[in-house]
Image (cartoon, rainbow, N blue to C red):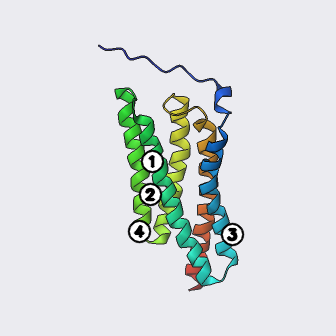
Amino acid sequence: MSSRPRLPRRRRSDAATIPPLSLILGYGPTALLPVLAVASATLPQKPGFGCLLVGQLSAASVLIFIGGVRRGLSFGAPDERLNRQVATALGYFFIGLAAMLVPIGPALVLLILGYALAGLLDRRAARAGEAPPYFATLRPAQAAVAVLGLAGLLARFLLLLSVG
């Protein structure tokens, strides 16, 4: 039986240090979603609906990108971790792809689910040494910003449906 070396357990203090570029690239794209939610709520119906569509496509694209990041982390992973990493990456990819192809209401629900999963699963991966330690701090907060924005977009969409 082949014994593969295990990655050392990370200290909690390691997870608190998020590289500045990761802060910008992590929060920048997801911060657009709450901005779009506020814009869609304050603009007239047609431009407001445009904000919903931009939010749908933007959030789906970022989730697909997050899947690519997870796939990249699997390169060089031990066999027992490879399947989990690839499955997670494919999950993010297919949720994002489906969210681009289905109507906006179901798409927003799918995206909320996808980002909630990213927040949970990427934190778990960081704690297990399968992702950079700062993912334990970055990804849940990044996902929360996205979910908040997506929930606002979904609320606006439901309001537009009820108005007609």
Q: Quadrant of the N terminus?
A: top left
Q: CA distance from mark 4 to mark 2?
A: 10 Å
Indicate which label's residue lies in the foreground, 3 or 1: 1
- Mark 2 sits on what residue? 96
Q: CA distance from mark 3 to mark 1?
A: 27 Å
Q: Position of residue 163 (x, y in %)?
A: 60, 84
- Mark 1 sits on what residue? 67
Mark 1 and mark 4 in contact? Answer it, CB < 8 Å: no
- Mark 3 sits on what residue? 38
Disc 1 crowd, CA 10 A, few/some/many (<14, 14-19, 20+): many
Q: CA distance from mark 3 to mark 2?
A: 22 Å
- Mark 4 sits on what residue? 102
**Residue at the spot x=39%, y=34% of the render?**
75
**Residue at the spot x=35%, y=35% of the render?**
83
Amino acid type, callout 4: Val
Q: Number of marks in the image?
A: 4
Sequence-earlier tag: 3 or 4: 3
Q: CA distance from mark 1 to mark 4?
A: 19 Å
